[in-house]
Amino acid sequence: MGNIWLFPYRIGQFGGAAFLIPYIIFVVLLGATGLMGEFAFGRMTQQGPIGAFDEALKTRGKKGGKILGAIPVIGTFIIAIGYAIVVGWFIRFFVGYITGSAMNAADPGAYFGQIAGPFGSVPWHFIALLLVLIVLLFGISSGIEKINKVMMPAFYVLFLVLFVRVCTLDGAVDGFKYLFIPKWEYLSQPKTWIYALGQAFFLLSLSGSGMLVYGSYLSRDMNIVDGAKKTVIFDTLAALIAAVVIIPSVFAFGLDPASGPPLLFITLPAIFKVMPFGRLFAILFFISLIFASITTLVCLLEVPIEAVQSNLKLNRKVAVVSICAITFAIGLFVENGDVLGQLLDFSSIYIAPLGAFIAAVMFFWVIGIDKAKSEIETGANHELGNWFKPMAKYVYVFIAIFVFVAGILLGGIG
């Protein structure tokens, strides 16, 4: 979801292809250390962050792991509250293009403002969580895996259809030039590298929570190295597909490629209004966003659901319904776009990178880099090279705390 929500904005902000160079460096580095680590940590302990952190400290005769484990759970839950509202916005726009109300709106900004105000999206917010609740009730294999097998390929197919249409727009070639002809001067700016790091960090969902929980459901014969590699590849493909649809469209209509997240709700709807067959492509675009955002929200909510299941000994149905109900109830009071932005910033700046840092310390230092490496290699086709230990134990742990500090100093980098 972050690929669509923020990646095109970052490219627009930092000079097109120049941004892709540090981004690819960092996404590969983080995938080969932090992502594999969180998958393996979850699989080793067969628990979410609360249980995993507690078990790690117990190996050293220490207590307090459950308290530390609650940090990433709370951070992920806060993001889930916000994302549920965003999914509702996508559903509202999708329905608006089906009925024609979004297409006929005189001012796309005003149309978005109607649902981004206080209590402005209650029914759509509810529908979003109801859809996610249904998926979650079916569990991992019957719910999450099956819905992802449909929604994620559909996302790629729909965006490829949009890409073909974008290629026919007059002026789109300037957008492709902007994306793929590097402005090398941006590589000399530290912020380009810092924001590329933040983008890679958050798009891989490194927070000591979601990927760790998914890892807890993996079997011992699962190839974690291969899984992390595919995650990096398809995550990057999704980011590039989103960029080559959105940025050339913006250029074709003479709009600002660095206009930020409003690209999705204000800039692109303005384009659909004047584009031939714009209503059809708007429907395809927003149904793609719904697919992407539902899979993201499912991942986010699985973290607190696993926590209450494991620690309060609730059955899955009770845990799912309870968490979704609490998410909706709290979310009602943050539907205002400004409040929502502050909530998401708080979690992404202060809690998510801190959770990733704690998870990295727990796995690579407390459990130990040798055991961590052995766990990651279990089920893999070959052993990791000598590069892994220093990169995971020192470089990745340093990066996690750097993301935390840089986010505070710069007001968020992902």
Image (spheres, rainbow, N blue to C red):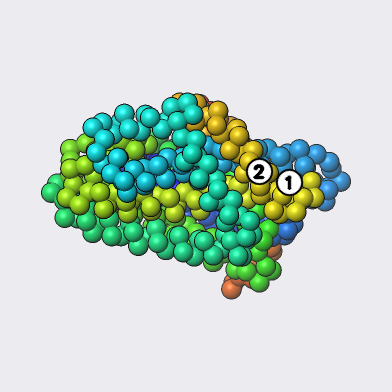
For residue 388, what is the image quadrant? bottom right
Return the residue found at the far right.
Answer: 61
Checking the image for residue 243, the label placed there is: none
In the image shown, does 332 or 218 lie closer to the viewer? 332
In terms of secondary structure, where does tag 2 sit? helix
- 392 up-or-down from 378: above or below: above
On the image, the x and y values in percent for residue 115 come to 41, 32
Pointer 2: what residue? 323
On the image, the x and y values in percent for residue 123 come to 49, 39
Pointer 1: what residue? 308
Return the residue found at the far bottom.
Answer: 381
Circles 1 and 2, Cβ within 8 Å, touching? The answer is yes
Task: Locate residue 12 relative to residue 206 in the image: left or right.
Answer: left
Cα distance in 3D space between marks 1 and 2: 9 Å
On the image, the x and y values in percent for residue 156 come to 37, 60
Q: Residue at x 64, y 59 (%)?
A: 139
In terms of secondary structure, where does tag 1 sit? helix
- 294 up-or-down from 382: above or below: above
Q: Earlier in the sequence, mark 1 or mark 2?
A: 1
Q: Amino acid at mark 1?
A: Val
> Tag 1: Cα neighbours inside 10 Å, few (<14), some, or many (≥20)?
some
Q: Amino acid at mark 2?
A: Ile
